[in-house]
Every structure is written in C-alpha cells, then in structure tokens.
Image: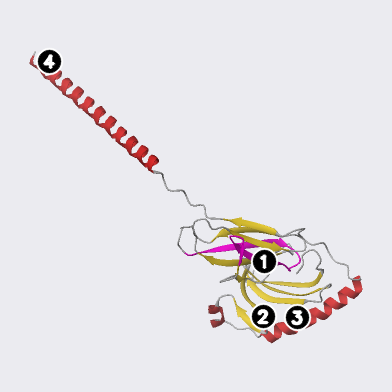
Amino acid sequence: MDGSSSLPRLLLLLLTLPGIWGVEVRHTITQMEFYQKTLDSGIDSFEFMFDFDGDEIFHVENEETVWRLPEFQNFTSFEAQGALQNIAIDKQNLENSMAASNNSRIPSVPPEVALFPKHAVELGEPNVLICCVSKFWPPVLRLRWLRNGIPEFQGVFETSFYPDRDNTFRKFSYLPFIPQPGDYYDCQVEHEGLAEASVAHWEPQIPAPASEATETAICALGLAVGIVGIAAGTVLIIRGMKLGRARVERGML
C-alpha cells in the first residue's frame, strides 16, 4: 500500500447491544463489520468481528471464525457464513453509496503510534514488545517491525482493526524478543493520513553497572559512617559512666 495515493471507500456498521438489561448498562457487546475498496488499486477488503467492552471475542477470516482466545468456543459458536452474507450486502450498499456521492470521501485521520514492553525488562529474559496504533481512519495501514534497522518477521502477531466510539480505529502488533545489550527496535507505520511513515523507537533502559571506583567510594563511605557511629557510641558510654560516678559520690556525702 502506498499511503499517499490509496483512496479507500468504506462502509462501516457498528451495532452495540447492552450486555446487562436495565436502566444502567455496565457492559456492551459490539458487532463491527466493514467493507472497503481502494480506488486506485482495485483492492477490496472487509472485516467482521464481535468484541466485549473493547476486547475482541472473535473475527471472521478466510471463511472461518477465529476466536481471540480458543477457550471462548467452548461456551458459544458462530457460523462464519452468516458474516459473509452480511459483507456481501455491505459491498452492494457501498457501491450504491459511491454512485450516489460521486466517489466523494471524508478526510483521513492519521494514527498515533506507541511502543512499549509487556513486562519489566531484564537482559536475557524473554519479553514481548507491543506496538499500539490508534485514533486513525480509514482502517488501512502497513505495519512492520525493525530490529537494529533490519526488518523482523519471526513471531509477529497482529490483531484485527478494533473500532472506537469516535469512529476511529486501533490495532495492536506483538513482537516476542529477548533483550540484548545494544539492540534497539522500531515499529514503522504507513497510513494515507501521514505524509511519511511514523516510527516509534524503543531500546532497553538498563542501568549501567557500577564501576570499580564507584564501588570503592561506596565501601569507604560505609566504613566512615561505621567509624563515626562507634566513636559517638564510645563518647556516650564514657559520659554515662562519669555521670554515674558523680551521683554515687554525692550520695556518700
């Protein structure tokens, strides 16, 4: 995808259902589906998914239902064919909308990109880098990982496009890695709302080991504090003994 030239048209449907019936709605289940086409390349794409309070339950991919966590399918099921029928209707509605609007479109919204580790970083300990791309429109982008400036593909996992309440989207990408001294990572995102690719940079912030001179200074400081403490204690003991003798002598008089 060339972010500066692609011109997607998209039909988006959001259906939000209350998860708890009553006056106060505490949880929501959202059905999201869209169909879009890129005018200059003729590439079409679609998505159909359900989420619960912003977390994905499942999406439909290659005519199959893909559960975010495999355990979910132990409690319920969903026929992917029903989603494909909805998408076919969305495609027809998009064609009609494009003809009626003379292919006009709303402005793009560029993404915000953040990069951070899943766990506290320790050299040599397995971890996961998370690239969060949010607040963008339309849901078309290219994301890639770079390790020390070289593309990294092994173990990468990307989520679907997740809808937000302001009609923008967010997406996550995960990269398993083992922190090593000198390594650095970049998450590069291309989107038609950006004049150039947005790059989020990350490298381990590991405290440098103390030098030999620093260790010597710390030991000397500890020794000095210990000597001062001993001297102060000795002075207090001597003073206490003198006061005790003075009281005894006064008592004898």
Which residue in the structure is indicated by mark 4? Answer: 250
Which residue in the structure is indicated by mark 2? Answer: 61
Q: Nearer the viewer, mark 3 or mark 4?
A: 3
Q: Nearer the viewer, mark 4 or mark 2?
A: 2
| For marks 2 and 3 on the same chain, the one whose residue lies earlier in the sequence | 2
| For marks 2 and 1 on the same chain, the one whose residue lies earlier in the sequence | 2
Which residue in the structure is indicated by mark 1? Answer: 143
Determine whether the residue tagged by mark 1 lies in a helix, strand or loop. Answer: strand
Q: Nearer the viewer, mark 1 or mark 4?
A: 1
Q: Answer yes or no: is residue 223 visible.
A: yes
| For marks 1 and 3 on the same chain, the one whose residue lies earlier in the sequence | 3
Q: Are marks 4 and 2 in contact (CB under 8 Å)?
A: no
Residue at the location (85% across, 78% down)? 95
Using the image, determine if residue 64 lies above or below residue 227: below
Determine whether the residue tagged by mark 2 lies in a helix, strand or loop. Answer: strand
**Disc 2 residue type (three-letter):** Glu
Residue toward you, 24 or 233? 233
Q: CA distance from mark 1 to mark 3?
A: 25 Å
Quarter of the rendering containing residue 9: bottom right
Using the image, determine if residue 177 lies above or below residue 11: above
Q: Residue 49 location in percent, x, y?
A: 67, 75
**Disc 3 residue type (three-letter):** Ile
Within-10-Å neighbours for mark 4: few <14, some 14–19, many 20+: few
* Residue 87 numbered tag: 3
**Disc 4 residue type (three-letter):** Arg
Q: Residue 139 location in percent, x, y?
A: 73, 68
| For marks 4 and 2 on the same chain, the one whose residue lies earlier in the sequence | 2
Q: Which residues are magenta?
A: 126-151
Determine whether the residue tagged by mark 3 lies in a helix, strand or loop. Answer: helix
